Image (cartoon, helix red, strand yellow):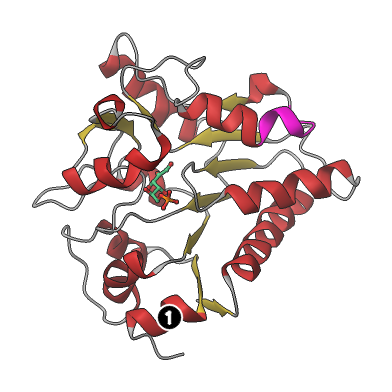
Amino acid sequence: MIVTKSYEDSCQRAAELIEAAVLANPQAKLGLATGGTPLPIYRRLIEDCKAGKISFAKVRTVNLDEYCGLNGSNTQSYRWFMDHNLFNEIDIDKTNTYVPSGLGDLAANCREVDKKVRENGVPELQLLGIGNNGHIGFNEAADLLHTETHIEQLTESTIAANARFFDKSEDVPTQAITMGLSSILAAKSIVLVATGAAKAAAIRGLLCNDEVTTQNPSTFLKLHPNATIIIDAALATAAGYEN
Ligand code: F6R
């Protein structure tokens, strides 16, 4: 658990943890996330790679999720996001990067994700953001959660939150392929970064009691032996978290 002065500092800490994993094992497998939260983290990785401080030449990556119905050349797809916000700017071999596909045979795609998570070793580190309702990956708050990769119907609140990235709200996909809880928790270490008052209730559930509930999927991270939650002081205050 790390409380920083600012979101900027949180992203710096997360980037340092990712780089430490890669320095310890240049062939590390990294589990990556999309959304607004990781963007400054990826910018730091790019900067450090361009400055010659770190190389991703042998790193392998697997992403948490992808919208259904968008192909990788669609600028709203998570494949496009990863290519343009990280992979194209660092020295990674793109053939070693994997983003789930939300097109075609979805059942086969789900099995492929779980295989990618586990083949030749599980991720050294899984980076996570968190939804306003506590979702991790796109495992939405519900009575029942899934362990394995599956197709998730996005909730109205998630669709509304994602709409900021789209010109028209009707273009926001309503379904996503996402790693399930056991695929996420399989990683040797987890780094979750959160900022903003909208995440306060979810973070309160994650940090301020010992309860695990499907109504806040992030609470399952309490079962992981090596999960680091990084939040800034403003979010800690909003969540009522006392350091
Ligand atoms: C993205 C993902 C989601 C986001 C979450 C927070 O790959 O799995 O769980 O991390 O929706 O999104 P932002 O960072 O945009 O607030």
Q: Which residues are magenta?
A: 86-92
Which one is nearer the viewer's eye here, 73 or 91? 73
Under 8 Å from ligand 1: the CB of mark 1?
no
Residue sitting farthest toward the bottom: 242
Q: Position of residue 89 (x, y in %)?
A: 75, 33
Which one is nearer the viewer's eye here, 103 or 47? 47
For residue 38: magenta? no
Q: Residue at coordinates 36% horizontally, 80% vertically from top-left?
A: 238
| Residue corresponding to mark 1 | 236
Q: What amino acid type should be assigned to the residue bearing mark 1? A: Ala
For residue 90: magenta? yes
Q: Position of residue 57 (x, y in %)?
A: 79, 32
Dividing the picture into quadrants, the one containing residue 107 is top left
Vertical comparison of 69 with 129: above or below: above
Q: Residue at coordinates 68% horizontally, 31% vertically from top-left?
A: 87
Residue sitting farthest toward the front: 167
Q: Position of residue 36 (x, y in %)?
A: 49, 48
Mark 1 lies on a secondary structure that is helix
Which one is nearer the viewer's eye here, 156 or 170? 170
Lateral position of residue 143 relative to residue 195, left or right: left
Neighbour class for label 1 at 10 Å: few (<14), some, many (≥20)? Answer: many
Q: Position of residue 171 (x, y in %)?
A: 30, 25
**Taking the image as drawn, is residue 25 in sight?**
no
**Taking the image as drawn, is residue 167 in sight?**
yes
